[in-house]
Amino acid sequence: MDLGTQRVQVVALKDGAVVGRAQGFSGFDPTKAAEQAVNEALTQANLKLSDVNHFAATGSAMDMAPYVNSTVSMMGADAKAGVFLAPKARTIIDVGAEEARAVKTDERGIMVDFVVNERCAAGAGAFIEAMARALEVKLEDMGSLALKAERASPINASCVIFGESDVVSLIHRQESKPEIARAVFDAMADRVSAMMHRLGINPEVVLVGGVAKDPGFVASLNRKLGLTVVIPKYPEYVGALGAALIAATRVKEAPK
Amino acid sequence: MAGELIGDLLRLTVLAGLGVAGIVAILIWKKNLAMRVTFLRLVIQAVAFAAIFYIFTYSAVIPMLYELIILFAITLFIGRFFCGWLCPFALIMDLESLLRRALKIRYRIIPDKLNIALHKSRYLILLVFLLLPAVLWLLDPQEILVSPLMAQLLAGHFRPYGILLDPMIPFIVPWTGPLNIGGVNLSYPYAQNIITFTGAELGQIFAIAFVAVTLIGGFFIRRAWCRFCPTGISLAAINQFKGLRGVPLVYVDKDEEKCTKCGVCKRVCPVQVNEVYEQKGGKIGTSQCMLCARCVEMCPYEDALKIRVGNKTVFRSRDWLQPPKVE
Amino acid sequence: MTKTVEKKFLPDVPKKEMDELRNTVKAASLKIIADNIERMKKADPHRPEAMKYFDDIANLFGQRQQEIQAEKEKGKKVIGYMCLFAPTELITAADAIPVRVNSGWYDTSKLGDRVVPVEVCPVIRSTIGAKMIELSPFLEQSDALISVLTCDGMTKLSEILGDTKAVWGMNIPRVKDSTQSLRFWNDEIKHMKTQIEQFTGNKINRKNLKEAIEISHRATKAFRRLQELRKGNPVIMGRDAMLVNQAYSWDDKKRWTEKTEALCAELEKRVERKDWVVSPDTPRVMVTGTPMFWPDNWKLPTLVEEGNPQGVIVADEQCSGERILNDPIGVDEWSMDDMLNAMSERYLMASTCPCFTSKDGNEDRINWLLNKVKEWKVQGVVYYVVRGCMLYAMEYTRVKKALDKINVPVYYLDTEYTREDVGQMKTRVEAFLEMLNARIDI
């Protein structure tokens, strides 16, 4: 279970295979949202609550998660799941709603080092959301819009608020929407890649988290890093999957 | 004949005693028993003083040249250990320092540049002395005697070499000394040579001036003479050859990581050796160092400075605020 | 025509507002002190008996304040200082009381914003704020302040505090290993000596200075005994030891030494019984960076030692912690001159503050950190920086490279004088500890 600032994801794991996944908005009552998501995932997998051996929670609101047996840090979960999904992965970038982090891992999925973006949200999903609002486009369309751009306009990405005012001034200069959209992703990718450089880039690089679903950001990041990042099938579930994988090892270590 | 035999036996006894004292000292080190190395050193210096006094005054059996050779050989292998721990002239200066400390008078330091210049000037002095026999020979060709007798007396043109043994001439021996001050005959390092080379009348004045200068200098400046003593140079000269840098077996070793560069070692060094502070770590390779271990003793960080013999550590700096575990 | 512009930084806070603010902050602070101690007690259910004394002394508005007040009424002077480079032995020798006055109150840093911009280091802002509402007991009690102009913040802070008090600036050289620096600093120390003599009316002579230095020596000895204990399996929580170390900067030095020795004796018995405070395989963490001042700025040690997984702080490299007492004054001969020389060397050259540089940059600090990591068997380093502390922040890159080389993970944690980011910090600290745990398991 990954209880993040915006969404909650639940993954049910049985004998090393994913049998159910569900997500919901955390909203004001993350506990309730999590309960719902858990039920949904379990129904998918045809399981009952009592069948679950171990609940592991991760994410920024993990202390509020229900049913929990143990907690896992987000970085640890990312590393575990990243290596599970792409065995050659040594660097995992997780760009979530309000936080971006890069985790360096070894081949067993044990994290070796990590960096987290500074407290500002300008390296994270919330930034795109705010920019989409400023551009009056749907969040889902941002990526495809950006891909149409030939060049990017310069933009300040040190802060969401400043970024937004930058976008507004670009609009006033009548730059085209695709270009601005691309600028937004470039700025974000700049931040993320600066963070990566602080950590040191070890291929293969896996991009996870909700933002990984955005083709615009992926294209920008590939450009900035000069390599192709690997994106798993359900990037937003990676945190929950990592927690589940760690839960599985914990069950093995300590049988009831 | 019997007297000589007894004398030799006595001498050997003293030497043996000295050896035992040395071994005991090393044992004390190894067990980290010494509270203050400075006191230990004073004891060893006193023993050495007695032994050297004995050898020089009574023994005619060990020829002076051999003594010189032995001294140089020792220095080659254990560094200037002799200077720091055995030399009688150094004992005089250490006693002066003790007196000064008792009187609460502060020591003076000489500028670093002058200190280095004095240090370097020793090479010149040594060179002059080494070349002197040749010059003398050119002036007055004479058959060079390579015989035990010559060796014994450093006679003839080799006479100047004797000066290198001068620091070992014991201080104040009222019944034999060549130096006459106020009707008392004194012996003092270098005094006899000064008188010999400059003539009795003038020499007497020079010698007294020399005594005054070195005594006063030694009082205010720690180990004043050691800074340019030509005897202490053998290692200095040898150390200049790259291949021989590793020769001295006894040396000060510094651990870079444990050092915080607090500067204590630099300040307490009686001959103002800066290398122990400036060098980042490893073997402190300077011919100015007399291995007196004052820096190691005063270093407030455990194991940051060590005195090593070969690869074995014999004395290490330790937290001097903490009394040693075994008393 | 002469133009006179009054130098004044601090705004005039109306008495009523000031009292109100002071009372609120003080009440909050007392609560935090009690809370911190409570949590420390909880973390270690059978805390050493001797810690009780330090819990009492940790109350800044309690026992120690009254003691100093009593001494002051008897005519003793109190001299405050901000940086560790202030030669406290001179103050003790002149029969005055040295106290450190840096502020650790979060609330007052917001008040400081009225005088200086938010970009300024919060330690400075908080100290200004404390002065504005006359909160800090020790700052109010000090008759004069010694301010060592180490970083930019300290330099201007001394000007700002100069509004209300005599502040003596000490100009510290930034290049610490050159002879001219030492000469200069030595002159500063000598000047400070005459200044203290004039101010207190007591002559500093060989005898009382020697006594003062010996008091410091004994304190260092006790401190080292405690440090030695922390090298082995943990017998004391890091927070407890950090509090002990920090208490030295306001406590009576002789009594502190006694109590610390008592604490060590108790801990040594525990070592014999193998009575560890936490399991010996708990990750051993070292904290370095910006000073963490009691009482408010205690969040990082609390997070580390109450985290899940738990860590234990075995060493720190901070001027609010181990740097206070790490270096003794190495006096060679007990003459006035040599004592002063030894003092100036101890305060200038032995320090590993990042405000210094030398031929090889601040290499001493790197070496000292590496040494600490090895000696205290540190498994992970938290590099703690508050926003605005340029010197520590900029030195991070070099520290990180050095620690990477010996394969010790280091985590850079930046924060502010605020309680709001505790949740976020928690995630990061716990992830770091989890990583350390994983490394240990391998």
Image: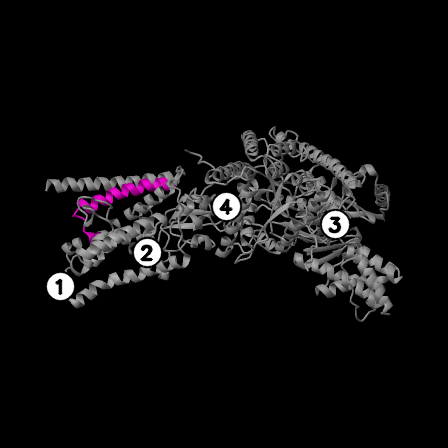
* B303 lies left or right of B24: right
Residue farthest toward the front in the current orientation of the protein: C1
Q: Amino acid at mark 1?
A: Glu
Q: Main secondary structure of the magenta part?
A: helix
When the figure is inspected, residue B128 is found, relative to residue C97, above or below; the finding is below
Is A121 left or right of C359, judged from the image as shown?
right
Q: Tell me which chain the residue with mark 1 is part of.
A: B
Spatial CA span between label 4 and label 1: 63 Å
Mark 3: give few (<14), some (14-19) or many (20+) Cα within 10 Å: some
Mark 4 on the same chain as mark 1 = no
- Would you name the residue on which mark 2 appears? B228
Q: Residues within 10 Å of mark 4 (few under 14, many from 20)?
A: many
The image shows residue B224 at horizontal and vertical percentages of: 34, 52
Q: Quarter of the image for the C terminus of chain A: give it.
A: top right
Q: Which residue is mark 4?
A: C343
Q: Are marks 3 and 4 on the same chain?
A: yes
Magenta segment boundaries in residue numbering:
B37-66
What element does badge 1 sit on? loop
Identify the chain of the residue marked 4, using the numbered disc in the image: C
> Which type of secondary structure does the marked residue at label 4 adopt?
helix
Q: CA distance from mark 3 to mark 4?
A: 36 Å
> The disc labelled 4 sits on which kind of residue?
Met
Q: Name the foreground residue: C410 vs B262.
A: B262
**Do the residues under discs 3 and 2 have CB atoms within 8 angstroms?**
no
